[in-house]
Image (cartoon, rainbow, N blue to C red):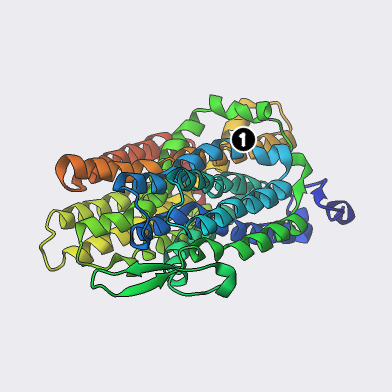
Amino acid sequence: MSNQINKGYVLTEWNPEDSSFWNNYGRKIANKNLWLSIPALLLAFAVWQVWSVVVAELPRAGFKFSSTQLFWLTALPGLSGATLRIFYSFMVPIFGGRRWTALTTASLLIPALGIGFAVQDVNTPYWVMALLALLCGFGGGNFSSSMSNISFFYPKAEKGKASGLNAGLGNLGVSVVQFVVPLVIATNAFGWLGGHPLTVTEANGHTSELWLQNGAFVFVPFIALSAICCWFGMNDIADAKASFSDQAIIFKRKDNWLMCILYMGTFGSFIGFSAAFPLLMRLTFPDVNVVNYVFLGPLISALARAGFGGVSDKIGGGRVTFWAFILMMLALGAALYFVANPGSAVAFPGFFAAFMVLFFATGVGNASTFQMIPVIMSRVIDKTMPNATEEQKRHQSDRESAAITGFTAAIAAYAFFLIPVSFALSKDATGGPQAALWGFMIFYVICLAITWFCYIRNGAILHVEGRRTQK
């Protein structure tokens, strides 16, 4: 069997639920694919989020764009990334995980190189900038296919841990952007290869040089290396092959739509607050230099996601999700208190701490919601295919779980756009972010109710799972 498994890039036999197979052959191959997937996903998130940092520097560098135009440059990657995720969700079973991961990672070179050249000239037309912002959506789309691909490699008992590591460490791309880009644009990191700097005149009359292009160029060599490693190091799973029509059954599954709501509450909050938090801090506390702090929230969330996938495997994803939403609500309540008292000496540290707890809770919920999906679908398939063999049930459950994982990630990614817009509308209507924060609170209450009623209450589909793992 080992010769068949390791022959070429295609795994012709793959059964991770077989403990002998998994311990002797499967685990090593699955982990190799996971650790090649993680840096590719990190770079995808970095490219997806790069405009959130670069846009803030465009006015200083001399670009004559209005505040509305700048807002759209920040928001467009969210729209295109979320839309691409819908299509990417179904691509791995059609094209194969190795080929699709390598090609989509290589596609990140297009916006990275394009931005690097475009920002060197203050006369670059706005439509070019908007097109490049849309192309950054390639990075957002990659998440759905990456998570779908990794889900095929692991047994049900370890899917939560694997998806948590892939997504959590991949999510670090947001923090990498917010930490690295401000550093590299201030230095001539690439010498003559990086092009000429733009001259910036500060408010005090002093001038400085800014290499905005470095904020995109810094990722180019890593993208190229990652794409090559994925092409030559990853595997395709023959049993994972499926057409779109085979996967389209998920649109008839009630749980697909319920998990879209829950993942909008967890991952949607993470990606939306990551995009909006710098501006929210700047508007709420204008005297604080937010650049020094904004990367911490996404960092905390990503690490929490990486760590709590395994925890969810052990005690039940539904229960972890329930408590994650409670923690999110408490943190949001604290944020509302501090934003209502901006003159207080503890307003900024209290508001910042509340959001760090909120980011932590989103990371926990990101991991636990994805752990829920394969467990839910395993039970759904048991009920809907009572006469099928165990192998047929496993294949169907894996196929639907992978498609739902990708699709829920696609829907949740629209929060990248919706949350910043909510803050903008709240600011225009009321002069502050409170209306938006109350809206998020109501949504979290809905998510909490769905988690309890549909999944963990007595008699619900995940109630026994949680009880069994506790004993």
Label 1: few (<14), some (14–19) or many (≥20) C-alpha neighbours in 10 Å: many
Residue 57 at x, y = what percent? 37, 61
* Side of 439 relative to 149 (left or right): left
Pick the front one: 126 or 22: 126
Residue 106 at x, y = what percent? 66, 53
| Residue 423 found in image quarter | top left
| Residue 178 found in image quarter | bottom left
Pick the front one: 412 or 372: 412
- Tally the marks: 1
Q: Residue at x 50, y 60 (%)?
A: 173
Amino acid type, mark 1: Glu
Residue 140 at x, y = what percent? 52, 47
Q: Residue at x 39, y 42 (%)?
A: 417
Which residue extends farthest front? Answer: 123
Depicted 288 relative to depicted 381: above or below: below
Residue 451 seen in this snapshot: yes
Residue 249 at x, y = what percent? 61, 26
* Side of 308 relative to 146 (left or right): left
Query: Which residue bears the numbered disc 1?
Result: 400
